[in-house]
Amino acid sequence: MKISFVHLTDIHWTGSNSYRVDDIMETLSGKFQQVRKYCDQYNVAAVLISGDLFDSKHGTKISYETSIKAAQHIKLLGLQVFAIAGNHDTSLNSIDNHPLKFMFESGILTRATNIPQYVSTQNGQNRVGIAGFDHSYTTDMSRFSAINPEQDAPLIGLIHMMIGLKSGKFYSEDRLGIEEFTQSNVNLFCNGHEHTSLPQMINSKGQIFVQPGAFRRTNTASEEIDRVPQITLITVAWDSAGKSTISTEYLPIQIKSDIFKDWKREIKSEKKDELKGFLERVQSMRDSTQLDINTLIKESDLEPEVREILESYVGS
């Protein structure tokens, strides 16, 4: 017997198109349709969201249309959806006056807390606990230890923080090492917050940590432009003796190309500075070989985009 879950994080639902050429709501809608297909394909029992459903922590900046669209697409998944609040969902550690609070209170989302809630297999013989811990910049680990799951029930915990193999700093923010979680009864931690994905990690206690990366590419940094968003497929299986095992796999979300307004322009600007010196060298070659510079460019081993830059520079 087995049961499956889908985990996604950092959706950053918004109506803003400040740095994109696509309709961002339409793009997010398409991504949720892909999640729904995965849920159907793998007979998923519930969906898990580990923070930052919305892009702004200030509820007054989130339009009614944006909130309704987000709610509609969560409901269209047709499954129970557990969630926690990320740093973009809270102001002064509170979700008051934020659409996320309405989603919890209306039942569109099930709020995951340190009191586990359980999802049963189809035959009702086995259960998996779901716990959650809203984002906090504190590094107090005691909140992960005050959990009492059912005996023999695997426990999945939703978190939203900086984690890694070892503790340290991520810019000015504390990053916790996975060995610091060993006092917790959680078997699998589903993390969010950091937008790049991390491979599955396992600590000395056998606790599993997954972080598929942000569901939405949120800026024009080079790593975001090329990043393929992912979600986590989680499968809990029981053998004939009733012993459970947990396996995880990242599933890709198809994305649109060339949605960022400025990145090509920025790359071209950088390349022009670099190519100016190159062109000066080519010019001296032309003087010595009597070859036309356009011929040199056409015969050079250059990528089409770089060749286009060179030709436009020479023509200007």
Image (tube, helix red, strand yellow):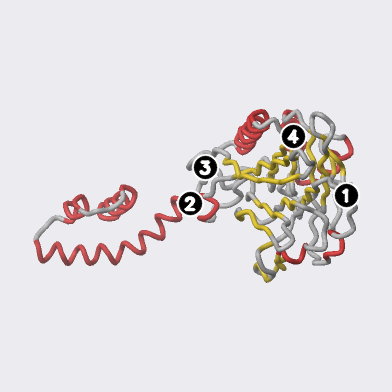
What's the residue type where badge 1 is placed? Pro
Q: Secondary structure at mark 1?
A: loop
Of badges 1 and 2, nearer the viewer stands 1
Q: CA distance from mark 1 to mark 3?
A: 45 Å
Q: Which residue bears the numbered disc 3?
A: 259
Q: Earlier in the sequence, mark 1 or mark 3?
A: 1
Q: Secondary structure at mark 3?
A: loop
- Please tell me how many numbered marks the rendered image carries: 4
Estimate how packed mark 3 is, as few (under 14), some (14 to 19) or many (20 or more) residues with alpha carbons within 10 Å.
some
Q: CA distance from mark 3 to mark 2?
A: 9 Å
Q: Which residue bears the numbered disc 2?
A: 263
Of badges 1 and 3, nearer the viewer stands 1
Horizontal relation, residue 249 to residue 283: left or right: right
Horizontal relation, residue 267 to residue 209: left or right: left
Of badges 3 and 4, nearer the viewer stands 4
Rendered position, 214 above or below 173: above
Query: In which image quadrant can residue 43 be found?
Result: top right
- Looking at the image, the residue that sits furthest to the front is 241
Say which mark, if any, is on residue 149: 1
Rendered position, 193 above or below 33: below
Say which mark, if any, is on residue 1: 4
Query: In which image quadrant can residue 186 be found?
Result: bottom right
Horizontal and vertical percent position of residue 301: 24, 53
What's the residue type where badge 3 is placed? Ile
Q: Which residue is at the front of the view, 114 or 118?
A: 118
What's the residue type where badge 2 is placed? Trp
Q: Name the residue located 81 percent from the left edge and 42 percent from the top edge.
A: 128
